[in-house]
Amino acid sequence: EDDPMKITEGKVTYEDANKGGGAKLLSYYHCGPTLHDTNANQEDAPTEVVLLHGAAFTKTGWKTSGILDTFCEINNDEDGGNLLLLALDLPVSADGVELGIAFDSLVRNQLLSGSPVIFISPSASGKGIVDLAEIMVGDKASSPSKKKDLTRIVKAWIPVASGSVLKASEEALKVFETYEIPILSIHGDKDEMGKKVTEMLGSTANAKTVELSGGHPVYLDSPDEFVSEVLQFLEENGL
């Protein structure tokens, strides 16, 4: 039987959304129950969490900080956790369309179930989520089905000082509350830009707001407190 606490590494490919683009490689860390074990029984469905990274980092930051290990260890017999974690090396340039294509590839490869997931997006990696919201309210979508990609892919959102929020339309930010996608916005007490992001999400998207001790990559500065806030948020929202 697979050990749900064990972290494995792998790669999948997904199609480049740009015209004439080929296949892109997406590397990941994974831990948690394997999906073919849980498919038969929806009650056993794990809580699926996707970790993205900021411009100055890679998926490795989640591992070296100990955050990934802490999340994965919740799956021990004693705590009885049921978390499926995927830390991705998705480019920070990824927009909503690219995020959707990458998501579908992870589903095809049985790394995700296909149900909406919880995204944690530090800094620049929030672009894809914000873009999905803009697609939903605007006329950017190439097809009607793409307009619903936000609700198809995102169950909850945990941005960590995601600057793209400050450039987003108010209409796009209100979509999260309209469609009952809970948000936990986290920033460091030494990060002025991050504080503005959190304030905006709190006032416009009804986000839960948390300030931790640290700078822009506050999840790396206060890893234990970060994990604790995320787990509390999941519990409060029945995720």
Image: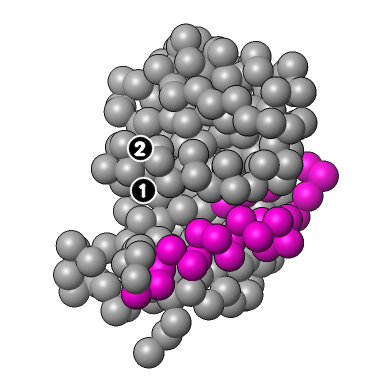
In this rendered view, identify the residue nearer to me: 221 or 17.
221
In this figure, which residue is indicated by the disc labeled 2?
151
Does residue 62 belong to the magenta stretch? Answer: yes
The disc labelled 1 sits on which kind of residue?
Pro
The disc labelled 2 sits on which kind of residue?
Thr
* Quarter of the figure that contains the N terminus: bottom left
| The quarter of the displayed image where residue 43 is located | bottom left
In this rendered view, identify the residue nearer to me: 198 or 173.
198
Residues at marks 2 and 1, CA–CA distance in whole angstroms: 7 Å
Left/right of residue 46 with respect to residue 108 in the rendered view: left
The circle drawn on residue 172 is: none
Q: From this viewpoint, is residue 238 visible? A: yes
| The quarter of the displayed image where residue 175 is located | top left
Q: What residue range appears in magenta?
A: 51-77
In this figure, which residue is indicated by the disc labeled 1?
116
**Dot 2: what SS?**
helix
In this rendered view, identify the residue nearer to me: 132 or 21.
132
Choose the circle earlier in sequence order: 2 or 1.
1
**Dot 1: what SS?**
loop
Location of residue 91 in the rendering, given as x and y in whole percent from the top left corner? 71, 49
Location of residue 56 in the rendering, given as x and y in whole percent from the top left corner? 82, 44
Q: Mark 2 touching mark 1, by CB under 8 A?
A: yes
- Crowd around label 2: few <14 · some 14–19 · many ≥20 (10 Å): many
Rendered residue at 48%/74% (across/down): 5
